[in-house]
Amino acid sequence: MAERSSGIRFDRVSVAYGGGGARTVALDSLDLTVEPGEVMALLGPSGSGKTTALRAVAGFVRPTSGRVLIGERDVTDLPPHKRGIGMVVQQYALFPHMRVEDNVAFGMKAQKVPKGEIPGRVAEALELTGMAAYAKRYPRELSGGQQQRVAIARALAIRPGVLLLDEPLSALDAQLRSGMLAELARLHRELPDVSILYVTHDQVEALTLADRITVMDRARLQDVGTPQDLYRRPRTEFTASFVGNANLLPVTVGSGEKGTVSFGQAELKVPTQDVAAGATATLCVRPHLVGLGDGPNSLTGEVAEVQWRGSTHRLFVDVDGHRVKADLRELREPPALGERVTVHFAPEDAVLLAAGVAEDG
């Protein structure tokens, strides 16, 4: 369906507002490439710079320095309507007085697509998003999920090389969000040439949809990689805590047997990689990889909290002044608060994060 050049390149793009002492840096020297046909998620907390990056691609903010390229074109100085992009925002932005088919046709009319082509392209976009049966309805007659599909259809109807999605599911309830995630995944399979830049603060959305994830914080790129790499082998504490959930424990690398660290009174076996003996580091282990009872790398402490989460229990165990989380298959008889328990994890399930690993990308 895409007819335009695809792929996005941020060439050291910075965006700042104000001047003098009041100058605010919203995006700091972003260097990033989104490959043709790739889904790239920009993941980070509020104020991290992810939406500013997306708006720089859309043409809604102008970089203070650096360049934005779409395909081989430098679009830094082009207005939004000349960039060949489709965009979907969280509030859908449908025209309430227009029927679905007219909302979808709007972008094509603005781009002066020949009148004879418009009905066929509207039908194609609605079919692609599963909304063909709703062409004659008004937005008020649709559910939130259906409105979002229409917004996506409108973005696709102009046949963009690049699709920008800005928190597109945040206004939906959990069940609708899950359904739309599946629809977006299907849509990507049917449009393999369209590059998608997806802004979200939701880890599940990023892990589910993205080919790669860019983790952002404080206006800077912190990490970038496949979802599996960032989840299983994060490079920084920020990535470990923001992509999924993590136990982050301060340890000291042993000077004796290679592959050991000290945590409080416990000696643990973990891959120490190139971290020097005697160095301080952070041990990362995911809660679902922590088991209850004796085993390799055992830690003993008091149960501080028990949370029932339906199919699982989350235990919070105080060990030497640090709280260790364990996500366990639902327990018939969970331990009582204050009870001493032992938890464990396998050496290969731990990642050692060296102190001083760059947090600024």
Image (cartoon, rainbow, N blue to C red):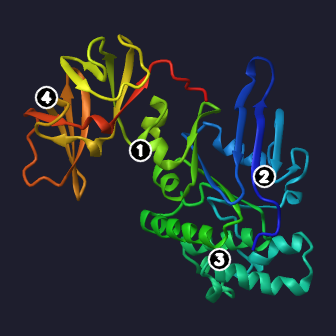
Label 1 SS: loop
Q: Amino acid at mark 3?
A: Pro
Question: Percent position (x, y) of residue 343?
Answer: 16, 36
**Mark 4 and mark 3: Cα distance apart in space:** 57 Å
Q: Write down the quadrant of residue 160 in the picture.
A: bottom right
> Label 3: which residue?
139
Q: Bin the neighbour count of mark 2 within 10 Å (Cα to Cα): few under 14, some 14-19, many 20 and up.
A: many
Q: Tell me what residue is drawn at x 78 percent, y 81 percent.
A: 121
Q: Is residue 79 left or right of residue 34?
A: right
Residue named by callout 4:
300
First-in-chain label (4 vs 3): 3
Quadrant assignment for the C terminus: top right
Judge depth for marks 2 and 1 and give the one in front: 1
Q: Tell me the distance, in whole angstroms, between the alpha carbons under discs 2 and 3.
A: 25 Å
- Secondary structure at badge 2 equals helix
Dot 1 amino acid type: Gly
Q: Is residue 137 above or below residue 316?
A: below
Q: Which residue is mark 1?
A: 244
Tell me which numbered mark, 3 or 1, is placed earlier along the sequence: 3
Q: CA distance from mark 4 to mark 1?
A: 24 Å
